[in-house]
Image (cartoon, grey):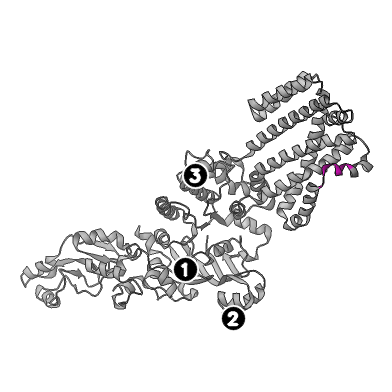
Amino acid sequence: MPPWLAILAASALTYKIGGRKVGLLTLGGLLFLWNLRLWQATVETLVLVILATIAALMIGIPVGIWFALSRRAWRTFSPVLDMMQTLPSFVYLIPALPFFGLGAVSACFATIVFSVPPVIRLTALGIRNVPSELVEASDAFGSSASQKLFKVQLPLALPTIMAGVNQTMMLALSMVVIAAMIGAGGLGRAVWQSIQRLEAGAGFEAGIGIVIVAVILDRSTQALAAKARPHGSA
Amino acid sequence: MGRITLENVSKVFGANSAQAIDLISQGKRKAEVAQACGAVVGLRDISFDVHEGEILILMGLSGSGKSTLLRCMNRLVEPTVGRILVDDVDVTKLGRKELLAFRQKAFGMVFQHFALLPNRTILSNVGFGLEIKNVPAKQRIDAAMRAIELVGLKGWESKYPNELSGGMQQRAGLARALAADADILLMDEAFSALDPLIRRDMQAELRELQRSLKKTIVFVSHDLDEAVALGGRIVLMKDGEVVQIGQPEEVVARPATEYVRRFVEHIDLAAVMRAGQVADGSAVVLAPTDTVAEARLRTVAGGSDGWLVADGAGRFVGRVRAERLAAARTGETVSGLLDLDPGIVAAEARLDAVLPQVAASGAVAVVAEDGRLIGLITSRDVVRALAARPGNSSSQTQPAGADRWTGTSPNSPSTRSATTVSTGSPSMAAG
């Protein structure tokens, strides 16, 4: 796929999600990166971030639901989440290496582990914060546990869960950059190389690139979260 | 359908519930149980019946256990001991799956803060109960629309809850409970969050709805005026116990305990009392066949500007004004002197509805449903009735007709004996 087509497609997508502002931002930002000859690196970074985020959500949302419904699970594993979030991010690179070796797979693994806590936490929080009167109402009408979950708890927790998705994606991006140390490609490698070669200019360009990707991802997911909010509020 | 029977229901919160139940069965009260084993008694040995098609109001201050009791009925709160029968189904014995099905079938519930799902339209909210029942979409929408029309929200069905005022949201909450077509409506302080004007409208409309739909309604409220407006039997609770059960006017006229007396202290008596309670039945009643001489003899004590006339069967015939009797020739009989336009009110009429008539004509006659004369209400009787708040020092000012027309035994604090009071609520007929 030629870069211009991919850029147009991405802009159209973000336009659809977030409106004109986000669409134009994506268009301008990606064209700028193409112009800087960072297109290849940008795509690699995006692919890693998106794959890692999807994997993190597939793990994190069900676990979050479990934590929300089981007080015991929450109490047992909450400290583990705390630990996962306080450990310095590059520590996750170490256990990944012996299993997957240098490269994108290790990077992806470390990224998933690093970025999963927010979505777990915010999914659990969102479900727990559903007003008890609404949960009681659904019980009073005879909902089964799964009806209650899918018709009441998850829809009402969606804005909070989407905030978790946003956080997870941002963490994934920051981790993908660091994962360049163990051979992940993308903008992170450009930064890493320019550090090693003391090329301030190239490093600055790659840094700007990361910022642009971050802003695009952040605005898009925030727009998604806003759409999930109940009608008319905030 | 819709009869509920509670038998010795108790609910204990906290540890030591077995010990607490033991203590309860020994007759210990809430405070004593708390002191003995630390458990909190939510409900203490409660037994009464909710009749089919009546509005029953669970009343008490916050913490008296009324909401807990309501939630025991559909087991949102599990009673610790006791049986709850709904149309001969023992709710407490249902398994998890059966309970869900039973809730879908038998109960609709309305909540204090509406509990509408903010992410759904009114239509979708109202259809929620049917959605849970897996009713097909078409049927669901039809039923939801019918319920929406019933509560007067037609035209608002595609709005979201936060676009509606509180009163309208609660209408939607009521529609949701009605849409599933359950026999029993459980209403938890349903109108308490609404402002007073809207609340009064909703109370009147609920009464209308109840009259046409014949649902059994259990209504939790802390507001005695609300109970009076809804016009059903009252179950008064305190510290998890039932203190008194009865029609509002009975509770007001004969409070079972000091607590009840204080609870009803500020009630608008005119709204609670019935004409039959206020009527003075001790006044002289003339017969239409009496001659003027006989009549003068019987009314020699005076004290009134008119006399009631009833036939041999006690049926009300008319009224004779004092000056007319005085001016009449002695040969005439009373039947020739009758006032042809006497004010008559039904014994079940609320006193406040009778007041304008009393004010206009000075006195009205009160008759029972079968036409039997009960007595006369003069402005003096009204003042006396309103001054005769139970607990006020002069106990002999108990309204003269109070015991005559209700025909019920005096209420006792024991719940079982009091549940037998008349089921056909006179207030419903009064309108």
Question: In this figure, which residue is indicated by the disc labeled 1?
Answer: B236
Q: Is residue A88 magenta?
A: yes
Marking on residue B350: none
Vertical placement of B9 versus A154: above or below? Answer: below
Q: On the picture, is A200 further left or further right than B395?
A: right
Q: Residue farthest to the bottom?
A: B26
Dividing the picture into quarters, in which one does residue B264 lie? Answer: bottom left
Label 2 chain ID: B
**Rendered location of residue B326, percent (x, y):** 8, 70
Choose between B336 and B412: the one closer to the eye: B412
Mark sitting earlier along the chain (2/1)? 2
Helix, strand, or loop for circle 2? loop
**Rendered location of residue A49, percent (x, y):** 79, 34
**Which residues fall within the magenta stretch?**
A87-93
Q: CA distance from mark 3 to mark 1?
A: 33 Å
Decide: few, some or many residues near mark 2? Use Cα within 10 Å; few <14, some 14-19, many ≥20.
Answer: few
Q: CA distance from mark 2 to mark 1?
A: 23 Å
Q: On the picture, is A171 further left or further right than B135?
A: right
* Residue type at the position of mark 1: Leu
Choose between B311 and A51: the one closer to the eye: A51
Residue beneath the point at 58% across and 67% down: B84
Question: In this figure, which residue is indicated by the disc labeled 3?
Answer: B148
Q: Are marks 2 and 3 on the same chain?
A: yes
Residue beneath the point at 79% across and 21% down: A36
Question: Are the two marked residues, 3 and 1, in contact with CB atoms closer than 8 angstroms?
Answer: no
Question: In this figure, which residue is indicated by the disc labeled 2?
Answer: B26
Decide: few, some or many residues near mark 1? Use Cα within 10 Å; few <14, some 14-19, many ≥20.
Answer: many
Choose between B87 and B117: the one closer to the eye: B117
- Depth check, mark 3 against mark 1: the one in front is 1
Whether residue A221 can be seen here: yes
